[in-house]
Image: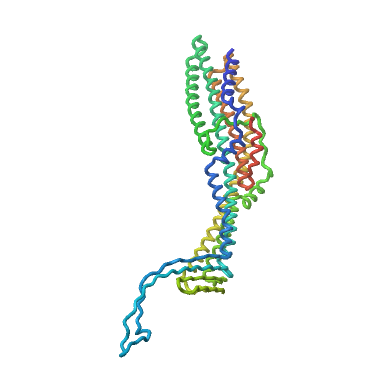
Amino acid sequence: MQRPLIAVLIASAFLTLNAPAAQAADLIQVYQQALANDATYGSARAAFAAGQEKITQGRAGLLPVLQASGSNTRNTGNEVLNPALTGGQVAGGSTTQPISQSLDYHINSYTVSLSQPLYNWAAWQQYQQSKLVQATAEATFAQAQEDLITRVSQAYFDVLTAEDNLGSTQAQKVATTEQLASAKRNFEVGTQTITDTHEAQAAYDLVVAQEFAAINDLDNKRAALQAIIGVAPGGLAPLRVGVTINAPQPAAIDAWVASAETQNYAVVGAQLNLEIAARQIQVDRAGHMPTASFIASSSHQNQTANAVITSNSIGVQWNIPLFSGFAVTSRVREAISLEDKARNDLEATRRTASLNARQAFLGMNSGLAQVKALEAAEVSSKSSLDSNKLGYQVGVRINIDVLNAQKLLYSTQKDLSKARYDTIMNGLRLKAAAGTLKEDDLGPINALLTH
């Protein structure tokens, strides 16, 4: 009569934990929430929008500049005229007295000017540089999208892992509670010693402590997911029982490493930064080069009680730098050093991408083997538990044997679930390292969940 009761209690514990799964959010739905609410991704999206303006700004240095300026002023005061200065004289040879007159007049003037660069090497290099800067913004945003996919998926499966741990601990608590009750009854009737009761009590106390830790861990994992999606997560769809995880394609590690060294978005960004640094050398060297611009202007001046003055000009303006206190030479040396830094950064980024691809590939293949081994271990642990329960009933096994068999089964089930989650995540990290991770890659993973 005890075995059916234990089975019912264990089943009820798992059903209670997974009851919301029928209306639970799946991975795609959680990812859509993250797209709308994740602050880190929102920041990357704004930075990408800002980066889209770089080409327009760089091109502006090559286009004409048209501007207008003007003034409207009123002038007041006194003007003193000295006839001696103008040759005025009176009888006897003496000069006349100074003549004073008041002034009060307006001057209204405006000028319209046009300047079109004809030769400006620095402006041309800055325009070419702006294309690279905008491409860097695109690569950075693509990397942010991959990062969001992996962060959401990791947080999602961390919650599922915590739920599995809590569910397993609660099921173990139910089974341990029944085993403790059985040990007490058997001690009362004299068929077992007090040692069996103490062992069952110790196992029960331990699993209660583990339950508190599992509840706290679940709360932390749900809070981490909330930080990404912006709202408190509800129930999450778990993995289906006995799912099959596909091996990485292609199956050769060299193909993934080669892709990581060329297509990884961090590598692409570092390559663009190297080209930007090389362009900056040309920009700084242009400080030694002449510039020439076509200019045209028209001005108009209207003064009260005087004629209107209008003037037009057209021509070419040039400038040849002669000496700038060695500033240009210093900036060139600085740019050359920064180019060398960018080259080393590229190499470091490429090596990191290669290492990440190797680790993810090996981790995924190791995970697939581990899942297969743990699936076999789960079957063996269930058989061992059944055998120990039967032996306990007939007196050939003691209480601690049953408790150990229960603990081994629940531990194996937790390890199996964790191995599946880690294998799935290594698959995503492998694609991210290779620069091929897309939103569509969540579809096959989402199909593995219970909807």
Residue 442, given in percent of the width and then of the height, sits at: 64, 39
In the rendered view, tell whether residue 343 sits above or below residue 155.
Answer: below
Seen as rendered, the residue at the extreme right is: 250
The image position of residue 9, as x and y in percent, is 57, 19
Question: Is residue 391 or residue 209 the one in the foreground?
Answer: 209
What sort of colour scheme is used for the picture? rainbow
Question: Quarter of the image holding residue 80?
Answer: bottom left
Q: How far across and how far down the image is residue 138, in percent?
A: 59, 51
Residue 23 visible, this orientation:
yes
On the rendered image, what quadrant is the N terminus found in? top right
Above or below for 303 versus 378: below
Q: Residue at x 66, y 38 (%)?
A: 443
Picture quarter with the C terminus:
top right
Query: Can you name the residue that lies furthest to the front here?
Result: 91
Q: How many marks?
A: 0
The residue at the far top in this view is 189
Picture quadrant of residue 375: top right
Q: Is residue 365 depicted above or below 135 in this figure? A: above
User: Where residue 117 sits: x, y (%)?
Assistant: 57, 68
Q: Quadrant of residue 76?
A: bottom left
**Above or below for 163 versus 115:** above
- Viewer-side residue, 192 vs 234: 234
Q: Is residue 217 left or right of residue 143?
A: left
